[in-house]
Image: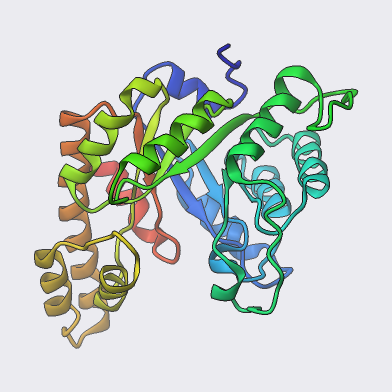
């Protein structure tokens, strides 16, 4: 059964349009000013923005609350990220019902980084269900009006369900098996983790083509050499091209701050415009997910050039 397209994002994907999505990270604060400003910076550039759920296991503003505020204040459609790390199935049901009540039309189901990696490493991870089971739970709520235990939901939520995939996985086969399971359980679209290499992106899109699910390739513009070096050395499976690293290192030595920022922007634009054009030309990817947290100023010129 093909689920109805409840969101603008899903309608665009079903129409075969190449789409762009952004990413917004709530902070450790009750002041929503920054996330509202970031959402506004994405308007007219992307179809929707992911709102992260305690990324890197750091305790930030609720992604559900932030998603609602962003939609209410800016009109930007949210992709509400929800992890199974922090909630048992009862809490997951509550949050999904809450998302439906607040007009959220996209969710992205994630496992979540382990709590030992975050700013409260003593926190106990939950993982009552895994991310595949969570896809099933959410899908049953939407499609059948039943929770995971078979209890009737008076007015079911209506949203489309996204999942994540890692194109850098080596070997790739176990990752494909996990994705296939989630697609079979009701996933509507997939956003990938960061890819810097066209061959990596192409291999992943080709390998997932049989699943008949829209794939958005994730990119991560690097606002400094330090950020790029960290990704290259510490993010499993991610390799930043040596030429890009060397160029960012050279540009990072420019003393004038304004000139340095402009040059870094230009380096990123040159690299990612070419990468995205190649993805559009050589793969069946449905779009690009731009992870530019803290580097939102690049989103508009990047999409404009494309």
Quadrant containing the C terminus in the rendered view? top left
Find residue 261 and report its horizontal and vertical position in percent: 26, 73
Look at 68% across and 46% down and name the residue there: 129
Find residue 182 and report its horizontal and vertical position in percent: 53, 32
Look at 9% across and 65% down and name the residue there: 243
**In the rendered image of this protein, does residue 94 appear above or below residue 268?**
above
Look at 25% across and 69% down and name the residue there: 232
Q: Based on the displayed image, in which of its 4 quarters is residue 6 positioned?
A: top right
Q: Based on the displayed image, in which of its 4 quarters is residue 63 positioned?
A: bottom right
Look at 53% across and 24% down and name the residue there: 184
**In the rendered image of this protein, does residue 302 appear above or below residue 57?**
above
Residue 175 seen from this side: yes
Residue 101 placement, left or right of 204: right
Q: Nearer the viewer, residue 149 or 104?
A: 149
Furthest-top residue in this view: 1
Find residue 250 and report its horizontal and vertical position in percent: 11, 78
Q: Nearer the viewer, residue 250 or 166?
A: 166
Residue 96 placement, left or right of 25: right
Residue 306 seen from this side: no
Q: Nearer the viewer, residue 297 or 185?
A: 185
Find residue 268 and report its horizontal and vertical position in percent: 22, 59
**In the rendered image of this protein, does residue 132 appear above or below residue 139?**
below
Residue 170 placement, left or right of 21: left
Residue 175 placement, left or right of 60: left
**In the rendered image of this protein, does residue 246 appear above or below residue 200?**
below
């Amino acid at each position: 059964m093909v689920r109805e397209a409840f969101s603008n994002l899903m309608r665009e994907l079903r129409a075969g349009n190449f789409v762009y999505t952004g990413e917004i990270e709530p902070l450790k604060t009750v002041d929503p000013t920054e996330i509202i400003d970031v959402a506004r910076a994405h308007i007219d550039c992307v179809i929707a923005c992911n709102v992260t759920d305690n990324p890197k296991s750091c305790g930030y503003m609720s992604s559900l609350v932030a998603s609602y505020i962003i939609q209410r204040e800016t009109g930007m459609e949210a992709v509400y990220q929800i992890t199974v790390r922090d909630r048992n199935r009862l809490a997951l049901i509550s949050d999904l019902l809450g998302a439906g009540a607040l007009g959220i039309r996209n969710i992205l189901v994630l496992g979540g980084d382990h709590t030992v990696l975050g700013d409260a490493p003593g926190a106990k991870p939950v993982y009552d269900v895994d991310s595949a089971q969570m896809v099933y739970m959410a899908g049953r709520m939407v499609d059948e009006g039943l929770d995971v235990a078979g209890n009737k939901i008076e007015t079911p939520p209506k949203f489309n369900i996204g999942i994540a995939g890692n194109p850098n996985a080596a070997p790739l086969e176990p990752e494909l098996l996990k994705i296939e399971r989630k697609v079979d359980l009701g996933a509507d679209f997939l956003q990938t983790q960061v890819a810097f290499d066209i061959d990596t992106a192409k291999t992943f899109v080709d390998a997932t083509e049989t699943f008949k699910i829209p794939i958005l390739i994730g990119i991560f513009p690097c606002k400094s050499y330090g950020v790029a070096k960290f990704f290259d050395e510490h993010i499993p499976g991610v390799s930043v091209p040596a030429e890009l690293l060397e160029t960012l290192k050279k540009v990072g030595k420019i003393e004038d701050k304004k000139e340095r920022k402009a040059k870094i922007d230009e380096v990123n634009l040159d690299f990612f415009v070419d990468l995205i054009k190649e993805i559009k030309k050589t793969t069946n990817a449905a779009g690009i997910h731009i992870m530019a947290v803290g580097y939102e100023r690049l989103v508009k010129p990047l999409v404009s050039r494309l």
